[in-house]
Amino acid sequence: MDKTGLARSTVYKYIEAGTFPKPIDLGGRSVGWVDEEINDWILEKINQRDHCQ
């Protein structure tokens, strides 16, 4: 969430909508994300921005 600047609730809303990578269960109440998947998501957002201008 630090990398995207999104609030936790927004991240989970996007996951539910299928527009954000799913987390990985790390055990207990902890989850994490694959860094490359988050980077790809950010690059996709940049491409969307650049194609809309």
Image (cartoon, rainbow, N blue to C red):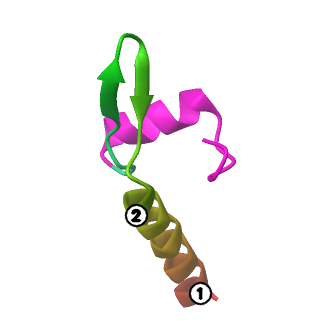
Left or right of 14? Residue 27 is left
Give the residues drawn in magenta, as a range.
1-18
Residue 10 figure quarter: top right
Q: Secondary structure at mark 1?
A: helix
Residue drawn at x 59%, y 87% as measured from the top left? 50
Residue drawn at x 69%, y 48% as measured from the top left? 5
Residue drawn at x 45%, y 33% as measured from the top left? 13
Specify the quadrant that holds the N terminus: top right
Callout 2 amino acid: Glu
Question: Considering only vertical position in the picture, is 9 above or below 38?
Answer: above
The residue identified by callout 2 is: 36
Which is nearer the N-term, disc 2 or disc 1? 2
Which one is in front in this view, the residue at disc 2 or the one at disc 1? Answer: 2
Residue 26 figure quarter: top left
Left or right of 21? Residue 30 is right
Location of residue 21 in the rendering, given as x and y in whole percent from the top left corner: 35, 49
Q: Secondary structure at mark 2?
A: helix
Q: How far apart are the two marked residues, 2 and 1, measured between alpha carbons?
A: 21 Å
3 magenta-colored: yes
Residue drawn at x 41%, y 28% as measured from the top left? 31
Callout 1 amino acid: Asp
Badge 1: how crowded within 10 Å, few (<14), some, or many (20+)?
A: few
4 magenta-colored: yes
The residue identified by callout 1 is: 50
Location of residue 42 in the rendering, given as x and y in whole percent from the top left corner: 52, 66
In the picture as drawn, the residue positioned furthest to the top comes out as 28
Specify the quadrant that holds the C terminus: bottom right
